Image (cartoon, rainbow, N blue to C red):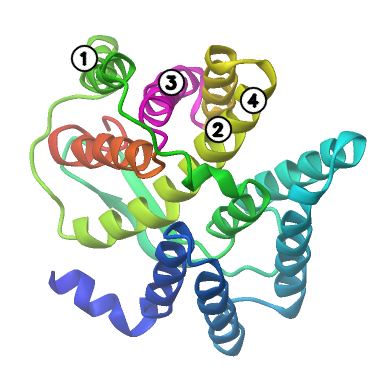
Amino acid sequence: MAHFLSLLPVVWPWFILIAAQISALSNRQWLGLTLLATFGGIALALGLVTPLAIAIAAIGLLGAAGLPRLSGTAAFTGHLALVLWSLALGAHLIPGFHNLLVLDQVRAGPDSSTFTMYLNLDKPLILFAVLLAWPGMTRGAKPIMVVPLTIGLVTLPALFALGLITGAVRPEIGLPEWWLIFALTNLFLTCLTEESFFRGYLQSMFASKIGTAPGIAVASLLFGLAHVGGGPALVIFASILGAACGLGYYATGRLWVPVLMHFGFNATHLALFTYPGPA
């Protein structure tokens, strides 16, 4: 807690961003966008973003807002542009975003490898864009399908077992002093953003075009490929995690289900195993 309190003087603007995310996901879109604009203005005043970054973000969001009214070739081109814009933000390729370094080469435990973490300004924008482009992602709640949900949930501990067998992780029980900033950042800036994009947006879109099972498979594979920087093994692990979360979303129609599955997996990884891997 002391570590988290020491960061409050510099991380407080991100609480406005988190409030914007929660509002947008609660179908209070205008409140979410108003809070996002407030966050953007504060970030600009603090020198965390440049006018160019604000302009690129605004263009992407405006373009996403117009996508539900397009069809045919125009819709295909627009969604392709949105995917490329999102990937560029997620890979931190757009200039002018000065993401805040909060953890620099720290270790979760003596056997863990070093870990660096930023509070992102760019990546969370993806959530708002895909909500504008595919608003139905938060309105598809349905009676829970027990079998696919159970398969998805059981896959999570099985993935840890696979990690132990292959040496990708080792047991290491305990939480580092920076666990709280990790939890908030991972839940809202990572898991919520990634699940909105890969499950709420891509999986829903692919499923509507090619069917449920292929849609889950394609979105999961793309999620794995997004982790290619960590090597082939991570691509495989992430693809399996993506499939588990995809089943959770399919079985419930509720976006918060894959978000909590993803976050629960990451939190368990931090608390019980070497994070992000053995030293």
**How far from the left and from the top, in percent, is residue 262?**
34, 37
Splitting the image into 4 quarters, where does residue 81 fall? top right
**How far from the left and from the top, in percent, is residue 16?**
42, 76
Asked which secondary structure carries label 4, the reply is: helix
Q: Amino acid at mark 4?
A: Ser
Q: Report the residue marked by disc 2.
A: 229
Asked which secondary structure carries label 1, the reply is: helix
Between disc 2 and disc 1, the foreground one is: 1
Looking at the picture, tell me which residue is in the foreground, 183 or 110.
183
Q: Amino acid at mark 1?
A: Ala
**How far from the left and from the top, in percent, is residue 239?**
47, 21
The magenta-colored residue range is 230-253
How packed mark 3 is, by other alpha carbons closer than 10 Å (few <14, some 14-19, many 20 or more), is many
Q: Which mark is residue 161?
A: 1
**How far from the left and from the top, in percent, is residue 115?**
35, 47
CA separation in Å, label 3 and label 2: 20 Å
How packed mark 1 is, by other alpha carbons closer than 10 Å (few <14, some 14-19, many 20 or more), is some
Q: Which mark is residue 208?
A: 4
Q: Reading the chain from its start, which is encountered first: label 1 or label 3?
A: 1
Between disc 4 and disc 1, the foreground one is: 4
CA separation in Å, label 3 and label 4: 17 Å
Q: Residue furthest left?
A: 173
Q: Is residue 71 left or right of residue 27?
A: right
Q: Which mark is residue 243?
A: 3
Q: Reading the chain from its start, which is encountered first: label 2 or label 1?
A: 1
Q: Is residue 79 magenta?
A: no
Q: Residue at x 36, y 42 (%)?
A: 259
Answer yes or no: do the residues labelled 1 and 3 have beta carbons within 8 Å?
Answer: no
